[in-house]
Image: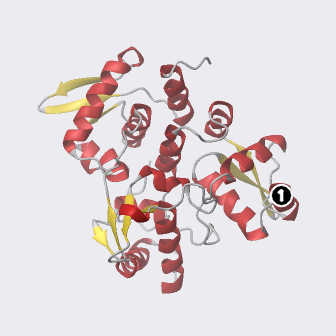
């Protein structure tokens, strides 16, 4: 069960080492994690194997964990990582992360991470158009209200800077070079745009269609958070980690995607019904790996 928006919890700060995940990092990291059979550690040996600096490999281990691809366990003083079911599914189905669905599912799991800048930004930061300073000040205010562990303004600024570097694509003719290896693939989701003429940022609705399986994953996780196999349409707009919050969708877009999902996955238990005066969406309790498998099956890829 998720904590409430007012409950004090422990926050995580700076584990990304100021690096947004970069093009090619995740495939390399997943491959090495699988080869080491659950004994991947972000040490100098891993840095040499991956061709990354020591801080970069620490950042990579965080991104693998934060996006649900790996889980860390303590081995003495160190933390070792192994792939999750989702990580295995991504490795087998989309090892080079060429399909948007993988990044959408990773975004969902990242944004659901409690006590993180990602969770705060997509759930609690209500400004649609903002500048870097406004966001950092709002994040610091939220930390002071909710975090058990304190943070300095500089820490909040670094976390917000990493988030904006990860998600913000540039508007207009100054879009970043897709061949730039330092570009974060999360920018392709088009959830945040930077306007270079003003230096301000804007939360936006994605330009491209969100894969229906990613939408269903988001909805099914919300239903599971409430201990149910269904969720009211109104809650898909207002609850934490809902499609409205994580994807920037309005009510019409949610209705449209839910109808398409019910048509495609009726045999799996996806359906729309009336419960009193409320429309509800019924969902199976699939995890991210199962929704990924459904996506590739729909595209005609053999299991």
Q: Residue furthest bottom?
A: 153
Observer able to see residue 171: no
| Residue 45 shown left or right of residue 269 in the figure | right
Q: Note whether 264 is above or below 99 in the view shown.
A: above
Q: Nearer the viewer, residue 143 or 1?
A: 143
Observer able to see residue 249: yes
Could you say where residue 274 lies in the image, as x and y percent from the top left? 17, 26
Per the image, the residue denoted by label 1 is 46
Q: Nearer the viewer, residue 34 or 229?
A: 34
Q: Residue furthest front?
A: 173
The residue at the point 81 percent across, 60 percent down is 51
The residue at the point 83 percent across, 63 percent down is 43
Q: Note whether 133 is above or below 76 in the view shown.
A: below
Could you say where residue 258 lies in the image, as x and y percent from the top left? 29, 31
Q: Quadrant of residue 78?
A: bottom right
Its colouring scheme is: secondary structure
């Amino acid at each position: 069960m998720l904590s409430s928006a007012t409950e004090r919890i422990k926050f995580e700060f700076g584990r990304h080492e100021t690096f947004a995940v970069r093009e090619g990092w995740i495939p390399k990291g997943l491959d090495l994690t699988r080869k080491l059979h659950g004994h991947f550690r972000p040490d100098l040996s891993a840095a040499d194997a991956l061709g990354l600096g020591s801080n970069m490999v620490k950042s990579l281990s965080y991104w693998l964990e934060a996006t649900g691809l790996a889980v860390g366990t303590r081995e003495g003083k160190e933390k070792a990582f192994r792939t999750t079911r989702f990580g295995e599914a991504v490795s087998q189905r989309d090892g080079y992360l060429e399909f948007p669905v993988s990044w959408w599912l990773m975004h969902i799991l990242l944004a659901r991470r409690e006590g993180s800048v990602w969770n705060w930004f997509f759930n609690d930061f209500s400004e649609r158009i903002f500048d870097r300073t406004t966001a950092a000040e709002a994040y610091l205010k939220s930390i002071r209200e909710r975090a058990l562990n304190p943070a300095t303004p500089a820490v909040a600024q670094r976390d917000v800077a990493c988030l904006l570097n990860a998600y913000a694509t540039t508007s207009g003719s100054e879009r970043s070079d897709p061949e730039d290896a330092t570009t974060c693939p999360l920018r392709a989701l088009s959830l945040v745009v930077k306007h270079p003429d003003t230096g301000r940022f804007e939360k936006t609705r994605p330009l491209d269609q969100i894969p229906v399986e990613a939408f269903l994953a988001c909805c099914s996780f919300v239903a599971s958070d409430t201990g149910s196999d269904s969720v009211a349409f109104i809650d898909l707009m207002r609850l934490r980690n809902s499609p409205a919050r994580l994807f920037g969708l309005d009510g019409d877009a949610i209705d449209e995607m839910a109808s398409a999902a019910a048509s495609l996955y009726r045999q799996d238990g996806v359906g729309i019904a009336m419960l009193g005066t409320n429309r509800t969406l019924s969902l199976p309790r699939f995890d991210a790996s199962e929704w990924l498998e459904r996506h590739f099956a729909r595209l005609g890829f053999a299991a």
